[in-house]
Image (cartoon, helix red, strand yellow):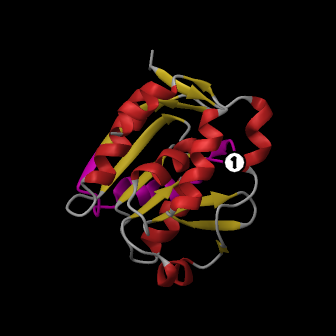
């Protein structure tokens, strides 16, 4: 059983509906605006970046999109893509962030200059956007999917980090443990 560090209560879910940056439908246009390291959260986002000829420094996938299995082309492209130096499987139940995911994400971002990492999540990777904003350096790009709209490009800055810290402070769980895992 994975160690759940924080859990998103239902009362906060609506606060995550607003995108944390501009929405792109074209991967090349997004990449023209992005800065390394780029962290991709989601199978469809990762697929579009790979199809555009780009290897994310860190990618998190769970073989699901909008609660359904991703199609075979998306899953197959990610599975057979040889651009990742390391593939790590972590457990992370829906609406949570586990110690395993947080530790693996922190390590992957710290090693992003030399090692491209694919984090294969058994469960759900949606909330990984939040700790990615906290562990990535200022100016880095975090890209995640906005259902039915496209790819959100969040640029890491103090404002984004303060939003994430405020949201995390209102989640259920152990914030001290959360902070320790990101150090």
Residue 94 appears anywhere in the view:
yes
24 and 136: which is toward the camera = 136
Residue found 52% across the figure and 60% down from its top: 158
Left or right of residue 32: residue 95:
right
User: Residue 103, image x and y in percent?
Assistant: 34, 36
Residue visible at 46% across and 77% down? 52
**Residue 71 among those drawn in magenta:** yes
Q: Is residue 180 above or below residue 182?
A: above
Which residue: 28% across, 59% down?
112
Position in image of residue 87 (x %, y %): 30, 46
Q: Residues within 10 Å of mark 1 (few under 14, many from 20)?
A: few
- Name the residue carrying label 1: 66
Magenta-colored span: 65-87
* Number of numbered discs on residues: 1
Relative image position of residue 37 (x, y in whole percent): 36, 66
Q: Is residue 183 left or right of residue 95?
A: left
Q: Is residue 151 above or below residue 26?
A: above
**Residue 72 in view in this figure:** no
Quarter where residue 93 is shown: top right
């Amino acid at each position: 059983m994975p160690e759940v560090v924080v859990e998103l209560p239902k009362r906060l879910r609506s606060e995550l509906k607003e995108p944390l940056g501009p929405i792109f439908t074209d991967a090349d246009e997004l990449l023209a605006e992005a800065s390394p390291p780029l962290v991709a959260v989601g199978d469809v986002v990762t697929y579009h970046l790979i199809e555009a000829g780009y290897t994310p420094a860190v990618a998190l996938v769970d073989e699901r999109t909008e609660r359904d299995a991703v199609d075979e082309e998306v899953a197959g492209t990610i599975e057979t893509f040889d651009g990742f130096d390391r593939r790590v499987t972590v457990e992370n139940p829906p609406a949570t962030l586990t110690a395993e995911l947080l530790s693996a994400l922190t390590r992957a971002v710290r090693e992003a200059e030399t090692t491209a990492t694919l984090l294969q999540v058994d469960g759900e990777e949606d909330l990984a956007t939040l700790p990615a904003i906290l562990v990535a350096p200022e100016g880095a790009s975090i890209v995640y999917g906005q259902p039915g709209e496209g790819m959100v490009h969040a640029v890491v800055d103090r404002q984004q980090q303060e939003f994430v810290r405020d949201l995390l402070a209102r989640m259920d769980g152990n914030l001290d443990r959360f902070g320790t895992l990101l150090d």
